[in-house]
Image (spheres, grey):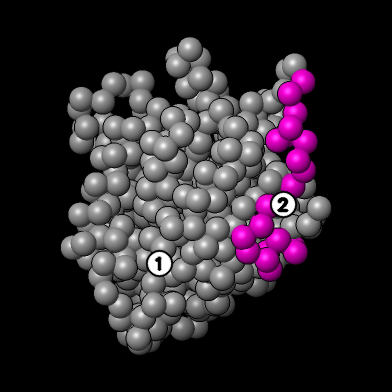
Amino acid sequence: MISAPEAARKDPVVTGSDRIARGSAPGRSRRVLLIAYHYPPCQESSGYLRALAFSRYLPEFGWAPLVLTASTRAYSRTDPRQCARIPESVPVVRAFARDAREHFSIRYKYPSLLAAPDRWSSWWFGAVPAGLSLIRRYRPDLIWATQPNPTAFWVAHTLHRLTGTPWVADFRDPVAGPGDNRWAQRACRWVERKTIEGCSRAIFTAPGAARQHAERYPAIPANRWAIIPNGYDESDFEGLGSSTQPHENRPLRLIHSGALYPGGRDPSALFAAIARLKSANALSGADVNIVLRGTDHDDFHLQLIDRYNISDIVQLAPAVPHKEALAEICRADGLLVFQGRMHNGQIPAKIYEYLRARKPIFALTDEAGDTGGLLRDAGIDTIVPIDNSGAITGAFEAFVQKVRSGDAPVAPPAVVAAHSREARARQLSEVFDEVLTTRI
């Protein structure tokens, strides 16, 4: 048998035990084919954590997973250490795939058709034959596919049409984004419509996203929609501990880990508020150190930091592997969330890890959105609109005081436990069971 790290270097390949392929003993687990472009060793998106967790925890609830993912050559960032977390009993096939921007472009320019429905559409040509081979060999009872790459749904739809295997669509994010080109928009709309019409269940990670799709497709029966939020994996926190250092005589360390960008997650209003507090001598680098890690738009944010003259308070830091990012979160005094109104129907996946770290959270988001609702339900009331610098000024100053005095709210353990990846796997297994039951 080939080990997981070896599998990361050899494409395509099947890893994992053959016993689920040939097992015909009474009471065997049902089998599910998991189709996920983002899967270890991929480090391009935190979405790999959702697929990885399901492949780890579904066996506890009677489902034996096998995984169809992309060739490691398609990823621009990898961490082979993550492959060690793939259970040895889970077969993994890595099919041919390329990123049009990285592999088919000249100075990052390439024909728009190569990005329809997304830049990874070449994966379809490798994944469909590989998926057919997996289905013939393992005879899964069901297919589950996750995006945000619409090509994953295109692959699942094709395999469903060719084999009749029922499938479940996992919408981590909207299929089509406003920045996609015209051809991609048309292809995304087609993929979304075929997905909603052809899948047995459409799963969303937030209530708002489910409502939006239900309104967009009023003819689809209500039982087609399901909600399974993201979560945290308890095993990721093993050995990390938590900061217990007194902070009376040092700056508070506040962390945001992940992408920030104009429009949806724009820190400009916070920067303006910090500059206002600094000018009033109410805040300085001796009081607070804010670290924005892995923004993906450092040049833009550096210009803002210079414009507001707050480099003594706000610093940028490069992205780091997931485990290191979690360790930093656990050592922090407080955590920052950015989520604009345009994303009211979404919840950042990092929120659940923030809650598990049991650190004070300062949320720049709409209280009426799903992110604000989740935090309120967890007892977090330090929430302010992302674009209101006046409101942020007073709220941020009060938050800093609460953190320093130990009065800032954190989520209680019982609330945190409900968001574990293991609990989400149980929810997914129940959806799978319902799908098969209703088809009998």
Q: Nearer the viewer, mark 1 or mark 2?
A: 2
Tell me the number on the disc at residue 15. 2
Tell me the number on the disc at residue 182. none
The residue tagged 1 is 260
Q: Earlier in the sequence, mark 1 or mark 2?
A: 2
- Residue at image point 72% right, 52% down: 15
Q: What amino acid is found at the position of numbered circle 2 in the picture?
A: Thr
Q: Position of residue 275 (x, y in %)?
A: 36, 76
Q: Give 262 or 66, whichever is nearer the viewer.
A: 66
Q: Position of residue 262 (x, y in %)?
A: 30, 68
Q: Are marks 1 and 2 in contact (CB under 8 Å)?
A: no
- Residue at image point 20% right, 36% down: 216
- Residue at image point 29% right, 32% down: 197
Q: Which residues are magenta?
A: 5-25
Q: Give 130 or 41, whichever is nearer the viewer.
A: 130
Q: Quadrant of residue 204?
A: top left
Q: Within 10 Å of the Cα at label 2, are there few (<14), some (14-19), or many (20+) other Cα atoms?
A: many
Q: Quadrant of residue 286?
A: bottom right
Count how many numbered circles sit on residues in the image: 2
SS type, badge 1: loop
Question: Is residue 315 magenta-colored?
Answer: no
In the image, residue 71 above or below residue 135: below
